[in-house]
Amino acid sequence: MAIDVDEWEIEEETYLKGRILAGGVIFSPKSLEVAIAQKAKGQNRVYNMPVNAEVSRPQELCITGNNHYEVVVSCVAPNGNNDPIYLDANIKGELIAIDNNKIIENVNCTFVQEPHYYSSKISNGDLVKKYVTSCGFDEFNIIPWKGCAISKGCKFCGTNSFIDADSLNAVSLSKNFFSWQNIEKTYLNNLREAAMLAINDGCYKEHVHIILIAGNLSDTLLDAESEVFMQIANTIKDVIAKKTPEGIILVVTPPIDTNILYRMKESGISTVVFNLEAATRNAFKKYCPGKDHLGYDFFVERLEKAVEIFGQGHAWTNFVLGLEPIQDLLTACTQLSRKGIICSANVLHLDKGNTLDCSVPAFLDIINFFYQLEEINKQYNYKPYYCAKALRTSLSNEAYAGRITKRSESNEAKK
Ligand code: SF4
């Protein structure tokens, strides 16, 4: 039984995910007891953390709807703009999602557990999670340093709020890149050992999404940054090859020298993701001033070049849904899709360290956007990124899977 809202029929798990993305989630004390019992993953604190959140706040919820369709959603913080979901637990310890005093039926909610490898160590005593972490259910994230040294930070991003004194970080590496060269060999050996342990975790039993990602080094070191990621891909590609449906995904600001893109492909990277974040030049300038310093066209030209080198559908760009009018964003997605670039978006969520003046979009705007985006992707046979259990703040997989339909369409289908 789907839920009817306005012109839409939305399957329950997708409804709940969309409502949490729009309004956030409040945990009852009982639901937090369940989180402890289920060994819920807390905040990774790798590159973001919700405003007003403690490290122990559960990071993600897994929601199963009809036909065993499973999605994972980030437990984003309430934003004061849209009504939050209240997550409670019944006497049996089962989670209950309450939407404006009404229980959402026909869904089964559990917390995403902390992977077992988070407590494992490699031979030098380092925790595996120093090298590999997991977002959603089955992302395998390799983030070689913390923070970002772009000339001016993006306004929605709080990545520089979580740098421990003893972590490698983008700002100090940018001041002294020799420090990376000194540790590179040891880092790569340790990473390989950690990857071999992590890849056998239960969370990667079905498949794994390998994502190499980090904040920028300084603008003059973008080519050197790409070199680091090529070495990482080379180091792990044989370890992860059999389990990944889409190969190694690299999410970075592109190199200045476009010839590096050829070598990226040779290193084992199968898809590159150069995120524009905002689609219109005005919003790009306003919300991503450091990226704007490199230039909007700098990104688009390298996405186009990546299509040529990696092939149609292997150059992706992601947006933050909420920075600009939805129709402007869809127009940009249409234009980029024609060029062979796959577009997607994460719903804006308010993280610690953000300096935004805009707010999270309304639920029906989120539904409408992902439905329209899927209409664009369908024309080119493009598939959404990763899967519904990895992408925690997007409904692109759910729209692709037909979990959002217009009532007029389903009436037509029933005739
Ligand atoms: S480029 Fe922008 S979004 Fe990416 S890490 Fe740096 S500040 Fe954050």
Image (spheres, rainbow, N blue to C red):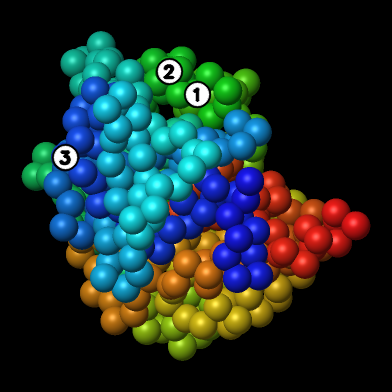
Residue pointed to by mark 1: 204
Residue visible at 25% across and 31% down in the picture = 35
Point out which mark residue 201 bears: 2
Residue visible at 45% across and 47% down in the picture = 104
Residue visible at 33% across and 65% down in the picture = 83
Residue at mark 1 to residue at mark 3: CA–CA distance:
31 Å
Q: Is residue 256 left or right of residue 372?
A: left
- Ligand 1 under 8 Å from disc 3 Cβ: no
Camera-near label (1 vs 3) is 3
Residue visible at 70% across and 51% down in the picture = 402
Choose between 107 and 234: the one closer to the eye: 107
Percent of width and height locating residue 71:
52, 41
Q: Is residue 258 left or right of residue 222?
A: right
Sequence-first tag of 3 and 2 = 3
Camera-near label (3 vs 2) is 3
Percent of width and height locating residue 25:
30, 53
Count residues near mark 2 (Cα–Cα under 10 Å), then give few for <14, some for 14-19, many for 20+.
some
- Ligand 1 under 8 Å from disc 2 Cβ: no
Residue pointed to by mark 3: 29
- Amino acid found under the numbered disc labelled 3: Pro
- Amino acid found under the numbered disc labelled 2: Asp
Count residues near mark 3 (Cα–Cα under 10 Å), then give few for <14, some for 14-19, many for 20+.
few
Choose between 18 and 325: the one closer to the eye: 18
Residue at mark 3 to residue at mark 2: CA–CA distance:
30 Å
Q: How many marks?
A: 3
Residue found at the very far left of the displayed protein: 165
